[in-house]
Amino acid sequence: MTLHLFKFNYSILTTTILLTTYQQVTLALLDSANDKDPVVREQVRKSILTLGKQQPNKVLSMCQDYLVKHPKLVIGHRVVILQTIELIVKTKIDDISYPKIKSIISLASDEMTRSKDVVPDWQQAASNILVAVGNKYINDIMEEILSKFQPGILPHFFVVQTLASLSESNVYGMVPFLNAILGTMLPMLGMAKQDNMKWVFSSALSHFSESILEYLANLDKAPDPTVRKDTFSSDIYAAYDILYCSWLQSRESKLRLTVAEAVGSMSHLMAHDKLEEQLPKLIPTILSLYKKNTEHYVISKVGRPLMTAAVNVPTCTVIVILLPLQVCAPVDYSNPLTVKNHNEVLRCFSILANTFPDRLVMFVLQKLENSNERIRMGSLAVLRHLINSSKSIMETKKLLILASIRQPLADHSNKVKKRVVQVISAMAHHGYLELEGGDLLVKFIIQHCALPDTYYVRLSYPQSVLVLWPMLLYYLTPGQYSNATTPLCKSLTLLGTKKRASQEPNFNIDFNEQGRCLLEGAPFTRCATEMCFFLSHPPCSHLDATLAKLDDFGKSDAFKKASGIFSLLKNDLDVEKMKSTLILCYGYVALHAPEDQILLYLLLFPQALYKDTFNALQELLRNILARDLSPDGLQSVFKHIEEWLSSGQDHERERAMNTTAHILEFYFNNLHVKNMVTFHNLGSLLGRLAPRCTDPNPLVRRAAIDCIYTLLYIQLRYEGFSLDYKDDSVERLITLRESMDNPDHSVLYKTCSELIISKRLPQQQLNTLIFMLFEGLVDSQSNCSRASSVLLNTLLKHRGAGLQDLVSEMLEVLHIRLQMISEEQVKVSVAQSILILATQHLQTVINTLISYPLPFDSWSCEMWIALGADSKLASQIMEMLMEKLNIMVPYVDKKESMMRGGLTKVATSHPLAMTCALKEMMLNGQSQDAVVSLFPQLFSSLLVRLGSSLGVTLPKDINSFGTNRKSPTKLAAGFDVCGWVRSRHTLASHITGVTLLARAMAKHAGPRLPAIVECLCPCLNNIYECQRVTITAFFSELLNHHVVTELMMMDVLMNNMMERISDPCCTVRMLAVRGLGNIAVGSPEKVNKYAKELLAAMSSGMEEKDDPGKRITLEAMSGLSKVLLYLDKKNVQLLVVYIFMKIKPFLESENDEIRCASIMLLGNLSKFGSGEPVFKDQIHNVLVSLLLHLSDPNLQVVKACKYAMRVCAPVVGSELITTMFQNHLHEDKSLHYGEFINDLTKYLIQDFPGMLNFYHITVIQFFKSNWAEVRAGAAMFIGR
């Protein structure tokens, strides 16, 4: 018995603990339900829902209690809890007790209507709870809602909204209440003055109507099957009268659309006589909303139920009113609403078609003749829709439609034609094409199938297949359908494949008849080739017949007169075109015929075919050249050969070179010079042929020598020499030709150079030759590309001085060629070319390269690097660039935008480019001598340039200014000229960087500093703050090092710093003060020499008014602390109290650094006040402050206090306190503050009883200190 009692008590205890934990968890979740993070809020809601599914009644009770106990809970928090209640009710409504349901209804109703103002999130959440409960407990919900929906009183917005939502979610539960609700609502409509109430009443009426219609449509499932439409008709009509006559005219578009939607739904419940009376007014009114609203879809959606209602009214005369308004409007397929609107309007026509098919079709067909293009397009869209959607109705009107569609077939508008094609496609799907006149539609499709975006006839339907096979075959041959040949053949291939797969009997065609018919009528080359493609497809048995036909055609006299089987070639076409067509036909046959069969035919061709073909080619070229035996005629023939000279295939280069040699020899042998004529293309021909003298193929090399030999004699003929004249220099080529079998590259390059430098090349040919050699730099054969580069450099070296006008263009071409060159040796030669041009035309080369777009691509960088290869030239270029950098404007101030004020510093382009250029030149190791000799000037210019980039943005057109170049660019690895400053550097980090640079220079480059300082000093007077800041920061750090004294620069730097003390820029003044303070570190022996100037500058710095952030004050106090360590007492004694008074206000500064610096300065000043009564009094004035700041939150301030109190201790006037300070106040040792203050107060009372009142008054002032630690220390101090 005892054991059972124990188990029972244990069970109760366990349950109680579990419930308590459950409640604690739920309560904690409710507290967290309004977390700032939406993810957390959602997770909390899910967790409460999980608990609610396990214990719905308890969790709902806790939620309810939480809301009741926290009436002032923020809206967002309440919303989350209400939404959670809704979720629990939705998922566990069957498990919730009835009393709890009643309390939840009461809670939600109160939350929904507590505020008279509309608070959507809060009240909607409460409304949703009522709707969720109403799905099961509709009577209880209605009892609560109707208590707040009383006659004569305008209800709360969300009471009406909840009724609307209930009618949608619980149709069968709500409809029995709607008659009473409508009776109560009707008087309220006249009371609604605000648009939001009109909107909610309209929305509710729309929902009520939809619910009633659904109820009536499913009476077999309804709880009360006696409900009838006329039960609601009168109330609905009364409401309609108010909505139509008053609210539909509102200026608020959202309200108008909602009212229109409600009217559309209500029209189904109105009595027929009333509806018939209203429709003539209602429909135009609804349609007029199209002009007042941009959301046409809603209006069209309203129009469809009106049409549905209208077709039941026999006297309705509203046929196709929508046509000119919406169906003709262009459809924006990227906007889903316009597409939905278009489809909705088309559905209206489907509704009308069911009742007025004859009138509707006639109306639409008549509109096809309208002069307005949009009307015609809209009519076609409706016609297509009716054909697809109303098949049974349109069945009897097929012939009428076929007859009427002929009118738009002749339309000139491509947009209309596109719609016509869409209609024909729909007709094809429904058997129209089989009827009389269907062939005209097929013909129309074929005529226009080459138009853009045209829809082709689908082949997946039996009706289409029956019509198109073999009809499409007959459209292949007439000339007017030539543009349709390709799609026709594709369609025939698809049709044939389909028929063969299904083994249809009409698949087989008698090609003796059909093929002959087709081939005799086809008008163009493409048609013939397409047909060969078609005929060469399987079955394989057609191959023999096709080849036989082609063979017959090739042997016929068709080449004399275009007639016969292949009359596709018109009489005005020449024989050569027929030959080309025949060859192309053979090509198609070879491509598509069975491989095993075609190989048998190919093996029959003898090897002699190649020889005959090659001889025929040469004969053809000779005949062409003979017609125009002039330089121009020679060039017109050569242009067809020259691209093969650089082919990657040896045999192609060999054939091309042999052909060139052949035509040059023919030209020379048949040349008759009657007048002095310029051989103007000598340069271009030599540029193409000379590099081939180094070709890896010996046959090509020999042929190249022959060509050049002939070319030079042709030139001699044009110069007036006789045919039998022999020139010794040209004859040497015969000897060189024999050495081409085992070439020595050096000999080859020398030979090429001698040819080019030869006097035989006239000056006027030079330009063409150079640019041809540029093309040779990317030759497929590395030997030839190297030869081109050698020839080019030799030519530039000897004749480049006269090419001033071509320098920019040559550099541009070299830049483009660099992008394609893969041969490293050629790249080196190109760099040499740039260097040669620079030695001859330096200013032009620099101006051209500077104008290239930034950031420089890698090839532009290579060009600048090339200029660093010659030390002497590099020095000249660097001096020129630095000279321009020093006088150019580094940036301009521009407005950020028209809308916002303020200016932005935007870098100017040319200084950027010059800085990039200097960087690239220095990357060339051979520029070392130039850099070393110009080191001070380069360093100074770049340092100033660095300062000029601070806070400067890149130009917006950084990639577009300068020369317009179409070549692809590859960005250089780093464009860091000012981008790094803009994106990563602040003023503080910039100063830090310059300081580190100056420190490194003082340590590692001391001997160069005097020259650098000399270069920089003039820039301190520049108008640009950023430059003065940079140089002052550099000088300031130099003063931190003894090398300044060793190199006798102290006076120069000291004078510059003193001048900068009055600079208009506060940052410059701060750096100048810092530099003066650094003298005590770098050259302490000079401190007393400049004592007067240093003390004046530091004192002035502590009094600085224009000092944001007190940076100058901080530097002045820090610098003075360093200077005081080395000053003689005589130089400071008279200023001690003055300086002390300047320090005192900063002891309580909120800036930790200033507080620390002032305390350190106080300590350093103490050695000058020893034995001075006035100084002793000042120390006692600040003693409380120092003691309290021993507990300062900043560790550095605490250390400064310990130091200051320790060094000031002898001045205090108490040996006990002095000993105590010196024993306990060490910077690196911890201090027990409570014990220290306890002991100190005893000594103060003992040694300074007269000061106690002063100490109390001073301590009380610290009760309002900014630091809690100091306030606590003050409380402790005064309590002692």
Image (cartoon, rainbow, N blue to C red):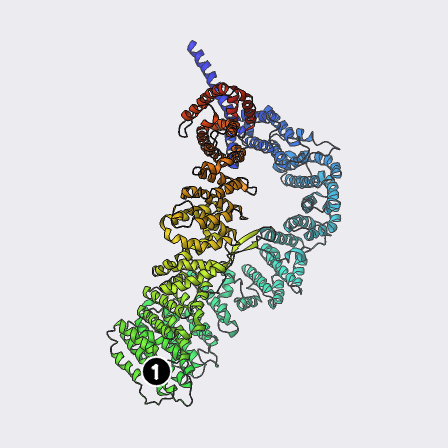
Identify the amino acid type marked 1: Leu
Compare residues 1098 and 12 and report the one nearer the observer. Answer: 1098
Q: Is mark 1 on a helix, strand or loop?
A: helix
**Res. 377 image quadrant:** bottom right
Q: How many callouts does the rendering have? A: 1
Residue found at x 36% / y 84% = 714
Q: Can you see residue 948? A: no
Q: Which residue reaches farthest top?
A: 1
> Is residue 892 rendered to the left or right of residue 14?
right
Residue at numbered disc 1? 712
Q: In this view, does 967 lie above or below 1245?
A: below
User: Residue at 53% of width from left, 46% of height from top?
Assistant: 1066
Q: Is residue 1033 left or right of residue 825?
A: right
Side of 613 where 361 appears, left or right? right
Residue 71 point in image, percent of width and height? 62, 27
Residue 192 lies in quadrant: top right
Front residue (pair 1216, 623): 1216
Q: Where is residue 38 in the image (x, y as percent from the top left)?
A: 53, 37
Q: In which quarter of the image is the N terminus?
A: top left
Camera-side residue: 1040 or 516? 1040
**Image height of 808 relative to 1145, above or below:** below
Q: x, y percentage for residue 763?
A: 40, 79
